[in-house]
Amino acid sequence: MKQRWRFWASVGLIWALSTLVDRLWWTMQTGVPAWDQADYLNSAMDHGRALGLLPGGGWQGWQALLDLSPKIPPLASLVNGSVMALSGDAPEQAAWSLSLWHGLLLVVMAGWGRRLQGDGLALIACLLAALTPAFLGLRTDYVLEMALMASCSLALWRLGIWCDLQSGGRWGQAWGCTLAAIAAVLVKQSALLVLASAGVWAAGIALRRGGPWLRQALLLPLLTAVLIGPWLRHNWITSLGGTNRAVFESAVREGDPGALSLTSWLWYPRILPEQLGSVLLLVGLSGLLLWWLQRQQSSTDHAWSWRWLLINLVAAWVLTTLSPNKDARYITPLLPSLVLLLSRGWWQWGQWLKVRLSRLVWPLFGAGLLACVPAGWSHQLHRFEDRPRGPVQALVEAAGGADPSKPPATLIVVPSTSDLNQHNVSFYGRRHGGRTVGRQLGGSRQDREPVLARTEWVVLAEGNQGSVREAAMQLDQAVRSSGVFEQVHQFERTRGGSYSLWRRRATHPIVGPSFVEVFPELAAGLAAGPVGLDPVFAVVGREHMLGGHFSYRAPVRSKAMEALAQDPDSVQPRWTLALLAVLENRPAQAAEQFEALERLLPDNPWPAAYRSVVSLAGWDPWQAAAAADGASVSNPVLAALGDLSGVLSGAVWRIPAAITSVPTAVTSVEEALEPASNQRQGQEQASS
């Protein structure tokens, strides 16, 4: 018992010293959160507000909570938002959540290391983890990878214990590894790359052994349905779309190598010295070679644990390499397992020295640890230099942001740089309960007129504009030369140039109909089918940028409900409520409105088609098939939706019909859209 207490006290001391170093880093840094960091800070703030823990929010129900995580699961943001409520919402205060996740990672590495080789290897692994450059960077970088590393490592460790023939197969172990695996996926979907091979292996073990293992294995699908199912059902479309953009489209845009190319397979090995440090890597690899040479003298008591670690590490490495998008962050969930493996090499050198140079074991080990320090030191110094620094906080305060007494406001941000972008404008604008958000426009020539007509605040850049399109420069010039806006303040940038804050002049008030008045007519455009969808969602998408608080929704809904109270058979309010439900991701409410429109518009095929689509979005293929098959009018799209949803609901005999009807529907939609596409291209060419 005393030895165990000393061991965990040593782990706690490593965490405390690591945290002290991290807090010094946060004290000395003077930068601002860039794109990803600000986005995750905003997500944590959103979830903290939704839980009622941070000012400016409150509990509005599960549906509202699920709305906050459309692309990435919510667990990390729920934890980080809760920590933010205790520590404060400044970036350096919010970063205490990284220390929490790092503590979990050290506990996992300590427990896993003890199982692999005992206390000695476990403490070596924790010490090396504290000095690893990649870990140092992620402990001071507000992204999800530290949480992902900790949760994935926890799941692998506990799953390996459950699978062990000698000591596994217990219900407590099954609950532990199942909840850990689900938690990892609820941190980020990419956890599946790390856990998929381990899960398949564990399933094979359960099937082969049967009995309690097989019954315990059923926990995974059952708890997945309970814990992941609600989020996935609510957000599966946006999650798939976000994954496609982040993985496939980003890989093409950034010029990453093909998944099967030699460059792809060497991508992550070549950055290991930078991530782990050359000394840590060299000593570890040479020690592993020594272990292999002395394998006849080694104990095989831990053979299963090492085999579990090594095979899953290799399998997860292969899956991560096959992912098209390449980035140093994407391999980090595997680094704890790799550090444990390399720690075995360090431990082996210790055993070799103990036999031959017993008096020099500790001095040489200490020298080896000190030799690992410069890699992490250099890495952190480089991050000091590379960290974005800008006047975003001062700019937001000049616009009245971060003040809960001020009315909700939207700042249109034309540039997009690491030191000023829509995400960190929103973060600083909503601190302390503030209600100012940033939104980016300028990606299209069609943004120019709405900005000039309806925007109150605009942020422009003098000098480098960042990652924006040519149309953003045209919007920039239009704001400066229109006379509609006046410059309020100019803020110098540390690397040259400046940012300027512009406000609408009192002599140019916002005129014309509000979006509340335009929305009903816009929603009625859905009656035209696919031809009407693009104009509707283009305008709505732009409105969501112009007014980042969606304040139009409540009055639009109120007016529609009043109209229906006066005339239940009125068509336009139904289109309004249906479009609102679609935009708010409420498929059941949308289906109800589209069903009413089917009755009111028996000759129009699109209400039935829309009801079928939203029913599929709500994971109800049976209702989707009934809506498409029961329509009072024939249409190629309805036929395809009926066959497709029928197959998804279990009617496999409809597969041959679907093979024919789906391509036919696609062709009919393309033919309908072609004139509108040609007209839009002509308008864009004329405006340029």
Image (cartoon, rainbow, N blue to C red):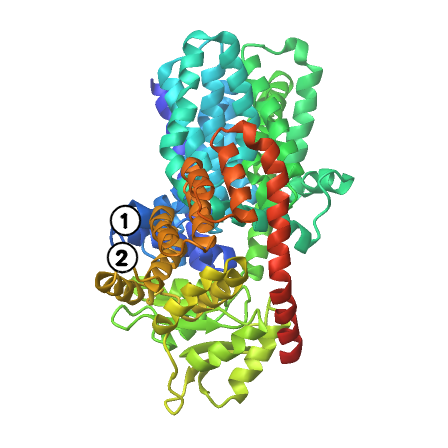
Front-most of residues 410 and 288:
410
Q: Quadrant of the C terminus?
A: bottom right
Which residue carries the number 2 mark?
57
User: What is the x, y in percent for residue 24?
Assistant: 43, 53
- SS for tag 1? loop
Q: Amino acid at mark 1?
A: Leu
- SS for tag 2? loop
Q: Quadrant of the N terminus?
A: top left
Q: In the shown orientation, is residue 251 left or right of residue 110?
A: right
Q: Residue at x 68, y 52 (%)?
A: 252
Front-most of residues 655 and 420:
655
Q: Residues within 10 Å of mark 1 (few under 14, many from 20)?
A: some
Q: Which mark is residue 299?
A: none
Front-most of residues 43 and 684:
684
Q: In the rendered view, would you say 144 is above or below 656?
A: below
Q: Which image quarter: residue 343?
A: top right
Q: Amino acid at mark 2?
A: Gly
Task: Tell me, yes or no, whether the two marked residues, 1 and 2, touch with CB atoms within 8 Å.
Answer: yes
Q: Can residue 374 be seen from the camera position used here?
A: no
Q: Which mark is residue 51?
A: 1
Front-most of residues 672 and 253:
672
**How many marks on residues?**
2
Q: Residue at x 42, y 57 (%)?
A: 27
User: What is the x, y in percent for residue 279?
Assistant: 65, 37
Q: Which image quarter: residue 439?
A: bottom left
Residue most extreme to the right: 262
User: What is the x, y in percent for residue 115?
Assistant: 48, 19
Separation (CA) of disc 1 from disc 2:
8 Å
User: What is the x, y in percent for residue 510?
Assistant: 38, 83
Q: Residues within 10 Å of mark 2 (few under 14, many from 20)?
A: some
